[in-house]
Each structure stands twice: as structure tokens, then as C-alpha cells.
Amino acid sequence: MPAPELPPAYDPADVEGPVFERWSVGRFFEQPTGGDAPFTVVIPPPNVTGSLHMGHALNNTIQDVVIRRSRMTGRPTRWVLGTDHAGIATQNKVEQKLAAEGLSRHDVGRERFVELCWDWRAEHGSIIIEQLKRMGCSCDYSDEHFTMDEGYQRAVRTVFVDWFERGLIYRGKRIINWCPRCSTALSDIEVEHEELDSHLWHLRYPLKEPVGGRDHLIVATTRPETMLGDTCVAVHPDDERYRDLVGASVVLPLLGREIPIVADAYVDPSFGTGAVKVTPAHDPNDFEIAERHGVAKVNILNADATVSEEGGPYVGLDRYEARKRVVADLEAAGLLIGIDDHVHSVGHCYRCHTVVEPWLSDQWFVDMKPLAAPGIECVRDGRVVFYPKRWENVYFQWMESIRDWCISRQLWWGHRIPVFYCDACGWQGASMDDLESCPKCGAAVRQDEDVLDTWFSSQLWPFATLGWPDKTPELGFFYPTTVLSTARDILFLWVARMIMSGLDFVGDVPYRDVIIHPTVFNAEGKRMSKSLGTGVDPLDLMAHYGADGMRFGLMLQVTGNQDIRFSEDKLASSRNFANKIWNASRFVLMNAGEDFEPGEPVVETVADAWILSRVADLASRVDEGLLTYEFGETARVLYDFFWSEFCDWYIELAKPRLAAGGAARQAVLRNLVFVLDTALRLLHPMMPFVTEEIWGHLPRSGPAEAPALMVAAWPDPVRLARYRDEDAERSIGLLQELVTAVRAVRARYGVSPKARLAVAVTSPDGEGMVLSSMADDVRTLAGVGELVIGPDVVRPAHAAVAVAAGSEVYVSLEGLVDFAAERKRIAGELEKAESELARVSKKLSNEGFLAKAAPEIIEKDRAKATDLAATVAKLSVQLAELAD
């Protein structure tokens, strides 16, 4: 149970652990089957090697927000939890550990290495799960999944065997992305491309025999070492310059191999010389040219990116050393025509950042085109909806030009490919069970050495975690899931593949909504990375700002834009917001005391009607905002209501009635408790800890209340709509404008808060009557003594003027301000502001400055000029007021 009363100050460290423990003991995270309209989210399974980063923090906050709202509405709600075995990442970790002991995986053997990977998972796999708890994520921790669990392995094997038997999985020689460091293939979308400064080398290829007086061709390349694997030169069939050369041969420099000149429409005759060297084993486009023309495919690199035996005198050299040697030898032979500076895109391994090699290799592939067609259709017909919607076009572009998926990886940790080979009779096949003997001849069989791409198993996550391939009650009830929240960088790696496999095996889409959340960059717009020193640790942020401060601060930064430039200031203001919620709640609870009589809210003043109308509006806007995934706007609405409308206005308006005692005190307390209760419920999805702790202290009207806020009823906007009152909102709006205007004058002239001001308001009859009815509230909130309101009010001498509520407001400064000193002070400030504005304006009118300065500097100066202009205008008005 919560502490007997709220301590004087909110300390997240004292609250978060005990609150989470109460949730766990109450088993509020768990959700059995049964009920109507289930709401299911599957967590994007974090790598078992991972720890929390800012992308996790944002995404898991988003998921927890939608999960908590749904749970409070009474829908059967489940957040499926688990981790991914992370083939390359985990294997790298274990290999690093072995290397520290002077060993390699080959020293210990495959079976022992896999055991070590399981040991590593047992030791480290729970780290990120505990970090999710630290964030307050309300996953179903009683049913944690892992992509290498026994049941999950059966699901993976079922998919492989099915696709294999249907001919969708095949083995063939293809150009794949090869990481020499990780010694494995990578899919296209596991390769990160970077623009790098390099060179373009122009080479002379001699013709075997002169043709029409020509004895050579000139080709260009960014990778001169690959010329060792050239097997033809291609030109466009319509290129008049080379038409007579098609069918002739050139002699490959350095190696002396004869290679043909072929005509192929792929060649762009306007690029370079229009003649292209073709290296089929090291470029996917060259591979296709070689397929069309039947030329050889010569692989000149080994798996470790050293030159193979096909490289002649360069055998054994590292690829970059070979480049230097090849260029030097070409130059010595007079075959290097020139070198140009050149910027081009170079692929890197997403895991270790090594430059990848396009490499000809035997690999397993999935034919994706038959699977892609239904995946496209389900988005076009609205069964799957992307938020923001613009991501649908990105999805379509990739799906409509989809390439076959290389699914084999040369690793030991992962789902081993269930294909078996009989060397005796040549049989091969895929099997659900491990085979020892050939089903055809009875001889011993061997299993394929490779494992499956990690994403092959991850694509089954929405249904394999619910028991598929068995037809479990969980699968029947919770599938399809409701919403997936994820980052844009795995839209193709994961999101699209889940859609295709879900349709293919379960017959329905895996989720209805897909949220593509923004990417979190640092304040300078750079990618967050611990290794680059640009990262921010969410655990440090939670230690400093509390989990709620971090969560709400992140939500405030979510907009419809693609990226977030992380602002720690938003977390600081969110921590202050948590303190504000705590202090306001403590004020209400201290006033409620033991004599408080719970009951329905009651309208006795226009302020009561106003706050109930505002909380009804809040419930509607928050509900709509969360249903449409407008997290940033929803956070701002919550912040503004609680801090401004509830704390700054209604609590202040309530204080005189609280002091009055009796029935008036009881009535306003009921309203305070009701509004606080409703606001806490609406805040809970984003700020679960502080709201849960406070809610546990609220007075209860009976034993039927929920045992915890996280399972309490969500405010029903339809039911609350009965409190909407436009007249009350208009009336308090007039009051707020008037009070704000008077406070602004007080602040502008430095008048003491204790001084009672004389205020006159010239107001039309309608507004005047409304304001007159709230005269006592104006006096209390604005520190006003004499207050005159009417249509014929005359401005007194030495009065500041403000406009509010459609009226002119005169605030007498007589006896409160030293006019001569104030005029001198303001004149000085005005002169200084005008001078600075002139300087900045001159700078911004300088074409040379605008042409050379960085855009952010220009923007900063323009903003400064705008601020200075506003300051000049304000000071001019003040000076004019004091001249009277």
C-alpha cells in the first residue's frame, strides 16, 4: 500500500520501486484470454546483447502509453514481451570473450560455442528487461519470449520447411553483401551506406587486335583491384562509337586474360567513356550482365577480403594493399590514364561498420515477389494503416521493387538451416526433425552449416509468441495485434516481412496500425552513439529526472516530423511538472483531511462550471490524441491543463471558499478531488509512477474502486460531456484576460506584489456584467483594491493602459512609481534596444554576410531582430504611458 500520506517533496527514487512492486504483486500486467475487443501490442524484441538507448526509451514509452490507456478502458490488454537472439551481435560478444582468452570459436568447436552463447544470454539477457521495468513499462513479464526458445524454434522450422517445399526457398550463386569482419552475408537492408571521398581511376584496356585503327578502350573504376576479376567489357548496343568493337576482345591488363566486348542495354553511354568493365563476382549489376552473355564469374576475394588464387601475383594481399599494388603496376605499364577525385556511396556492415564486399557466394534465398503482392494489397485496402501516412509510399516503393531475400548467414549462433544432404546418393531436403540417415538410401546425412538471418525468425514474432504453429487460445484471441510502434530503419527489415509472413501463415495481417516514430538525434542533429560520444544514457536521465520526467519529456518532443533533436530541457521541465502535480495534489489532500465527505462534483460558482467544462474538454482531447497517436500535442494539452488551468487558476479561485469552511468548503473540495482524480487518470499513461502514488491517497467513495490507478477506469469523454459549459468558459476567459493584464502591468513597472492596485475597466454592458459578477475573484487574483467596471469609465492620470477581454484596462500608478526615474530607465533601455536592433538589421541586410554565414547563424540573428523589435515596441508604449 502507499505511504499513509504524501511526503513534502516528490522523490522518484522513493516512489518508483515500491509502485512497480505493487503492480507486479497485483499481477496487473497479465491478461488471460476472454472478453471483447482485445488490444495487443508486441514489443519489438530488443537484442539480448542490448541495453537501453534513447530509441528504446522513446518507442517503449509510446507503446506503454497506448497499452495503459487501453487497459484502463477495460479492454483485454496485453503487451507481449521478449528478446531477440541477435545472431551477429551475440556471436561477436562471445567471440570477443574467447579472444580475450586467446581462443577462437574454431578452437572450442561449434557445439561448445553455442553453449557459450546460451551462457552469455543467461548472464546478460535480463539486463534490458530490468531496464524496461525501471521505465515503468507494463509488459506481461509473466510470459517472456525468446527467439531461440524451443517452441519458437519449431515455428521457425515450420516456416522454412513450408517455403522450401513450395519452392519459395532456393539455393543459388548470387552476389551478396559480405562482411569480412563478421564472416557472414548481410541482406541489402543490413548495409549502411556512407558518402566517402575517394577516386575514379581511368584505365587503358588494350584490344587483342586493332579494329578500325583503334587499339584500346578506356574504362573507369572506383575499385581498381576488382579488375582482376573482369570477364568482359560492356558497351550499349546503340553506341556508334563502339558498334564495330562488339565481338572483339581485349587483353586484361596485368593478368593477360582475353575477355570479350559485349553489347548490353544496361550500359549508360553518356556516363564516362560509355565502356564499362564487368566484374560479375563483385557487383550485382555486372552479375546480371554476365548471366545475359554467358561469361565467366571470377571471384578474386577470399572470405577475409584477401585476394584469392584467381588474383595471380596478388594472391594473399589484403584488398586495400592489392589496390595500391594494382594501381602502381598499371601506372608502371603505362595503362593508368588518370585519377579523378570522386565521392561515392560505400556500404558498411550495420553491426561492426566494416566496409562490405559484393561477393559471389552460394546462399539460401527466399523468392519474395509472390509474398509481396498480398503485403501491398493489405496496405492499399486499409487493413494496415501507417502513422504518419507518408510512410505508406515508402513501403510501396520498396515492396513493388522487392528483391529476393538472402536468408543464410555464416554463423554458429542462431537457427541452423534445417536442410540435410546425403553425399552417398545426392539427396537433399528440408526436415522438421533432425535427420541422421538418408530417407532415400539410408546413408548418413549432414546438416547445412549456415544459420538463418536473425530477421527470418523475427518476422514471426506477432504469431509465434502466441503459440503458432499450434492453434492456441492466445493466438485465436490476441491475433491480429492492434498496433506496432517501431523505427523507420527496420520498416523493411522487420515490419514488411511480418506483414508478408502473417498473411501467408495465419491468413491475416499481424497488426492494424503501424506507428513509425521519429528518430532521436542529439541536440546538434547527429546520430546518437555511445562510441562517438554523442549518445545519452536513458538510465542516467531517469536517475536525474525520474522515469516520469524522462517519459513525459520525450512525449513533449514527439511531433509529426521525421526526427527529434533531443532537448534535455524538456526533461527538466517535465521533472518540474511531476513536482507540480505532487505539490498540487498534496495541497488538495491536506485540505480534504478526515472530515471530507466524498461525493459527486457540484457547481456552485462559475469557476466550478468552468473547471468541470475544461476537464471534460481535456478528456476528449487526450482520448482523441492517443487514439490518433498525436503524443506530443496530447502531452502539451495535459501539461497546460494541470499547470495552468487547474493549479494557477482553479486552485487559486478555490482558496477563499476553502478558507470559508462549511458547506462551501465541502463543495469545492469535492470538485478539487474530482478534477484531480480525472487528471491523474488522463496523465497516467505518460507519467505512471507519480500518478499511481498520488491516486492511492485520494479519498474513496466506496469499496468498489479499483485496486490501482493502472487498472482504474479511463475517463469517458461521452459521460463527461454533460459538464461542457461554453458560457462558463467564456466568463472565466474574460476573468483570465483581465487578471493577466493587471499582473503584466504590475510586473512591467516592478510594483510590489503586496501593493493593492486601483483598476478601472471600460467594458461593454455584457462583458462588464460578467466581470462585475466576478469582482471579488479579480481582486483576489490580481491584488486589486479599488475596482471600477463600466461602459463610461475614464482613464485616470498616470495610469498604465492594457487591452483585455475586449476592454481597456487602466491601472493607476500614482504613488507606486517614481515617474521621472522610470522614464529615465526606460528611455535608456529603449535607446540601447534601438541601437542593437539597428546593428543586427544592418548585418542582416548585408548580402555578403547572408552568402557566407551558416544558416543557423542567420536564423539566430533573425530571431534576435524579431525579439529586439518587440522590445522596442513594448518600451515605446511604456515611455508613452509615463509621459502623461
Image (cartoon, helix red, strand yellow):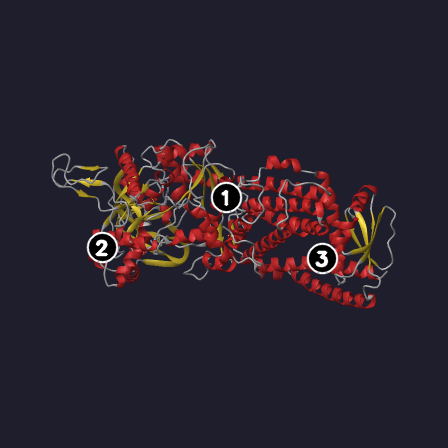
Which badge, 1 or 3, comes first in the chain's sequence? 1
Residue 619 in the image: x percent, y percent? 60, 41
Could you give the CA–CA distance between mark 3 and mark 2, rounded to whole angstroms?
72 Å
Residue 139 in view of the camera? yes
Q: Is residue 803 left or right of residue 116?
A: right
Task: Look at the picture and state if 871 lies above or below 257.
Answer: below
Residue 89 in the image: x percent, y percent? 33, 53
Residue 624 in the image: x percent, y percent? 57, 39
Q: Could you tell me if the residues under marks 1 and 3 are in contact, i.e. CB atoms within 8 Å?
A: no
- Which amino acid type is shown beneath numbered disc 3? Ala
Residue tagged 1: 707
Q: How many residues crowd around disc 1 within 10 Å: few (fewer than 14), some, or many (20 or more)?
A: some
Secondary structure found at label 2: loop
Of 509 and 596, which appears nearest the observer? 596
Of 204 and 719, which appears nearest the observer? 719
Residue 519 in the image: x percent, y percent? 48, 50
Q: Could you tell me if the residues under marks 3 and 2 are in contact, i.e. CB atoms within 8 Å?
A: no
**Closer to the eye: label 1 or 3:** 1
**Closer to the eye: label 3 or 2:** 3
Secondary structure found at label 1: loop
The dot on residue 870 is 3
Q: How many residues crowd around disc 3 within 10 Å: few (fewer than 14), some, or many (20 or more)?
A: few
Could you give the CA–CA distance between mark 1 and mark 2, rounded to whole angstroms?
70 Å
Residue tagged 2: 308
Q: How many residues crowd around disc 2 within 10 Å: few (fewer than 14), some, or many (20 or more)?
A: some
Secondary structure found at label 3: helix
- Which amino acid type is shown beneath numbered disc 1? Pro
The dot on residue 315 is none
Q: Could you tell me if the residues under marks 1 and 2 are in contact, i.e. CB atoms within 8 Å?
A: no
- Which amino acid type is shown beneath numbered disc 2? Ser
Which badge, 3 or 2, comes first in the chain's sequence? 2
Of 228 and 418, which appears nearest the observer? 418
